[in-house]
Amino acid sequence: MHQAQTLNTLRLLPDIQLIYGMEYLSKQKVYLPPPRYTKESKVLRKKTLIFDLDETLIHCLDDAETASPDITVLIPVTDPDSSVFEIQGDVMVRPHLYETLKELTNFYQLIIFTASEQSYADSILDCIDPNGTLFDARLYRHNCIETSCHSMGSTYVKDLRIIANRDLREVLIVDNSTLCFSLQLDNGVPILPFYCNKSDDELLHLLYYLQCVASAEDVRMHNREAF
């Protein structure tokens, strides 16, 4: 299923680029904080590694799923009359998430870029990374471009050109949806979607690849060869 979705996205890629190629100009540019130095080696983490959230790092269970959640969060929801209440969210965390992200902070500045609403994403990220030691910044649905391509319906594209102070030669994005990084295909690292598989080891494979790419002058060249 994932392969079929990816191939379908690639088939539609020319139309996507034609429709959205310049829409980033209407988006407010984002300025990421300066990269930090690694704790052990004091090496500057020059490259930026962007992670999707849902089905890449976590999976939020729906009512029909019976798996035992790893964490439970309270998610603020706003009614049409602007009143706010909280609902419980049961979340599966992808196996090896914490050790993988911690190791990657030795090579990259880590950023979250999700197509989810900010209140939902922050509820989960505040639990996963309460002290902000893993992720230096968070981008949300309002930073995306909403599609209107009739063959795909409504979805969101993450145009990396909204990041004003990073060179795309040094930016990677990991996402289970190729569509999300379709405007910068060479910057994307695809990953199989995660739902409830407790034996999932995709992050371990990802870690090995990202460690290899960390020293590349242009990460896009490596991605072209690999994917």
Image (cartoon, helix red, strand yellow):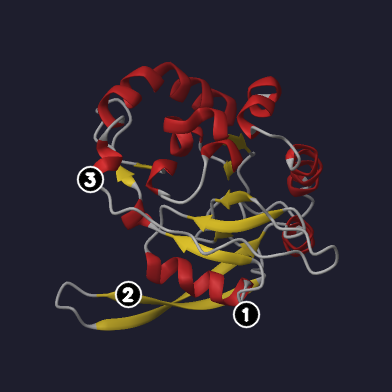
Residue position for label 1: 131
Q: Which mark is residue 219?
A: none
Quarter of the image where one finds residue 37: bottom right
Query: Dot 2 surroundings within 10 Å: few (below 14), some, or many (20 or more)?
Result: some
Rendered location of residue 183, percent (x, y): 42, 31
Determine contact: label 2, label 3, CB under 8 Å: no
Q: Amino acid at mark 1?
A: Asn
Of the two numbered discs 1 and 3 on the same chain, state the one appearing first in sequence: 3
Which numbered disc, 2 or 1, marks the residue closer to the eye? Answer: 1
Of the two numbered discs 2 and 1 on the same chain, state the one appearing first in sequence: 2
Residue position for label 2: 77
Which numbered disc, 1 or 3, marks the residue closer to the eye? Answer: 3
Q: Quadrant of the C terminus?
A: top right
Residue position for label 3: 26
Q: Tell me: 78 left or right of 40.
A: left
Q: Quadrant of the N terminus?
A: top right
- Name the secondary structure under disc 1: loop
| Residue at 63% over, 22% down | 224
Query: Dot 3 surroundings within 10 Å: few (below 14), some, or many (20 or more)?
Result: few
- Name the secondary structure under disc 3: helix
Determine contact: label 1, label 3, CB under 8 Å: no
| Residue at 30% over, 41% down | 24
Rendered location of residue 169, percent (x, y): 58, 36
Of the two numbered discs 2 and 3 on the same chain, state the one appearing first in sequence: 3
